[in-house]
Amino acid sequence: MLKTKAILAAATMLAGVSTAYSADLEVTHWWTSGGEAAAVKVFADAVNASGHNWVDGAIAGGGNARPIIISRIAGGDPMGATQLNTGRDAEDLIKAGLMTDLTEIAEKEGWADFIRPSKLLDSCRYEGRIYCVPVNIHSFQWMWLNRGVYEQNGLAVPTNWTEFVESSPKLAEAGVTPLAVGGEPWQLSGMSGVFQVALGGVDLYRQIQVDKSVEAAGGPEMKKVFEAIAQARTLVDNGYVGRAWNDATNMVITGKAGAQIMGDWAQGEFSVAGQVAGQDYDCLPGLGANPVLDTGGDAFFFPKTGDDETTAAQLEMASLLVSKQVQVDFNLKKGSLPIRGDINLDDANACMKKGIAILSDPENILPGSEQSFSSDTQGQMEDLWVEFFNTPEMTVAEAQGRFVEIIEFAD
Ligand code: BGC
């Protein structure tokens, strides 16, 4: 697990933290797709270059990885560092005193002065102390389209959900799956959050995610979301059950499908495939209807190991993850936006630039569902969306009734 490897001849001086040791840091994360692997390598290289040793602990699929990571920490088998979503994923572990306190380094480096939006760092706070470091801003609110597929079939590239639905029969006739979907619970639940904003509107999203309003959950705007999910299931192929999100992205990249509704991490896949935003593919924030972004993302947590040298290495790693060059290099590969605004992003592609412009207005920023709901509530929602998507006989009214019950008891 975590062992101090060797005493280095000279102290490593990094961002004000100094250590004379080289530690093995096992790092767990769920970044296993092509784009994600390219991005996480930036972190691994930076940690290795600092004199420590990144021991990769990738676990495929967020839905699998999260409970494994949490139960390892809770069960006394901590890793050196772990990715989780920025939000409530690690809430119980922090409360149980199992996470390394990063407050000192955060204050010394002024994280609160440059991490934006500030609510990302707020998600890392518990009783005034800081227990995680946000590394990016990700949003689920995007649709990705293969331009060539539309053009070759004599269709205009859709600029919103309505146009996408209208063009779908012609695409299907040409043997192209209109909508690439993976059937994992988080993928379907995420898609419903995108419909909440695009079709129900920003107010609906806030009423559900922030106010947890039972009335909104049972209301006409939310009904549109259920109807859209019912429509979406008529636009997918039969192989969607259990499909990984990046395999669905690959269907779009290779022209087997017209589009995918997926978070902006999909950009990493287009980039690894050598595709160019605005030329080969298009991106529609808010499905072209309501271009706002929920600002979730990833954060790194450092479980307590009881070993001082490892703690020192954890603090150095935290400092590296927010450093300017690492932020630029990582986020350009990941397709996410950096958590600091004071860095040069000239190399951002057309879709990232759209994202940056949207985020420049605070009104356009919505919370991610990992920030709004506990893991338990999120799990209940995921179960409902999967059941509804997989069961065409289930009516919109029945599914919406179940949703109301979940929101009533949501925490
Ligand atoms: C993470 C992303 C990741 C995506 C797919 C999300 O939960 O925030 O960083 O790329 O899952 O693996």
Image: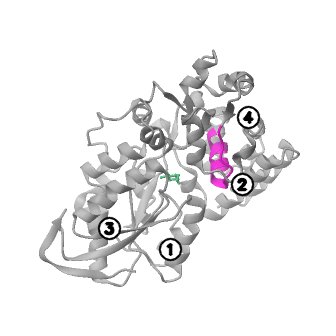
Q: Nearer the viewer, mark 1 or mark 4?
A: 4
Residue type (three-letter) at the residue carrying disc 1: Leu
Q: Position of residue 317 (x, y in %)?
A: 30, 65
Q: Quadrant of residue 147?
A: top right
Number of callouts: 4
What is the distance, in whole Å, between disc 1 and disc 4 at their CAs?
Answer: 41 Å
What is the distance, in whole Å, between disc 4 and disc 3 at their CAs?
Answer: 48 Å
Question: Circle 3 is placed at which residue position?
Answer: 103
Residue appearing at x 55%, y 47% in the figure? 246
Compared across the picture, whether 52 is left or right of 97 comes to left
Residue type (three-letter) at the residue carrying disc 4: Leu
Residue appearing at x 31%, y 76% in the figure? 311
What is the distance, in whole Å, between disc 2 and disc 4 at their CAs?
Answer: 28 Å
Question: Circle 1 is placed at which residue position?
Answer: 93
Residue 407 - label: 2
Question: In front here: 228 or 102?
Answer: 228
Q: Nearer the viewer, mark 4 or mark 3?
A: 4
Q: Position of residue 319 (x, y in %)?
A: 27, 61
Residue appearing at x 76%, y 41% in the figure? 226
Q: Is mark 1 within 8 Å of ligand 1?
A: no
Q: Secondary structure at mark 3?
A: helix
Q: Is mark 3 within 8 Å of ligand 1?
A: no
Whether residue 93 is situated above or below residue 393 in the rendered picture: below
In this orientation, does residue 296 appear? Answer: yes
183 part of magenta stretch = yes
Residue appearing at x 30%, y 37% in the figure? 345
Q: Position of residue 278 (x, y in %)?
A: 45, 25
Q: Secondary structure at mark 1?
A: helix
Residue farthest along the top direction in this orientation: 154
Compared across the picture, whether 346 is left or right of 372 comes to left
